[in-house]
Amino acid sequence: MVNTLNANAFLKGHIPNSLNITSMRVADQLFKKDDEIIVYCSDVTCMASYYAYKQLELAGYTNIWRFAGGLREWSENGFPLA
């Protein structure tokens, strides 16, 4: 999973084992075009994961997903944050 929030927000809490990636340069270094990539941010009103999804799509990534509910939905369903 990829957290698309800034580094300070990531340090305050994120889904365990997720990566904090905010640039396509880093994404291109870490992922292949067909890797499964799930992007998320804080909640459905946060557009950071939407923009990341669109950037990945435009760059030719083919197996991308957006977890729109993000951190809010994750924690409201009782899952832990790191």
Image (spheres, rainbow, N blue to C red):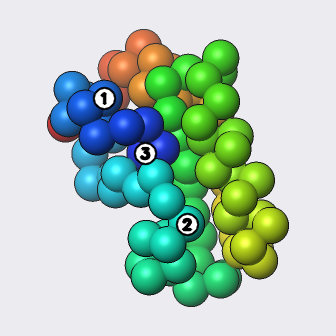
Kindly identify which residue carries mark 1.
9
Q: Is residue 68 left or right of residue 25?
A: right
Kindly identify which residue carries mark 2.
24
Dot 1: within a 10 Å radius of its alpha carbon, few (fewer than 14), some, or many (20 or more) residues? some
Q: Is residue 67 left or right of residue 2?
A: right
**Is disc 1 placed on a helix, strand or loop?**
helix
Question: Does residue 1 appear in the picture of this structure?
Answer: no
Question: Does residue 22 appear in the picture of this structure?
Answer: yes
Q: Residue at x 56, y 49 (%)?
A: 39
Mark 2 vs mark 3: in front: 2
Q: Residue at x 76, y 53 (%)?
A: 54
User: Where residue 72 sits in the image (x, y, percent)?
Assistant: 46, 18
User: Where residue 11 sits in the image (x, y, percent)?
Assistant: 20, 35
Q: Residue at x 42, y 78 (%)?
A: 30
Q: Nearer the N terminus, badge 3 or badge 1? A: 3
User: Where residue 47 sits in the image (x, y, percent)?
Assistant: 65, 30
> The C terminus is located in which quarter?
top left
Task: Count every numbered label the image shows and give the total.
Answer: 3
Question: How far separated are the C-alphas under marks 3 and 1?
Answer: 9 Å
**Does 24 sit above or below residue 7?**
below
**Is disc 3 placed on a helix, strand or loop?**
strand
> Residue 3 got which mark?
3
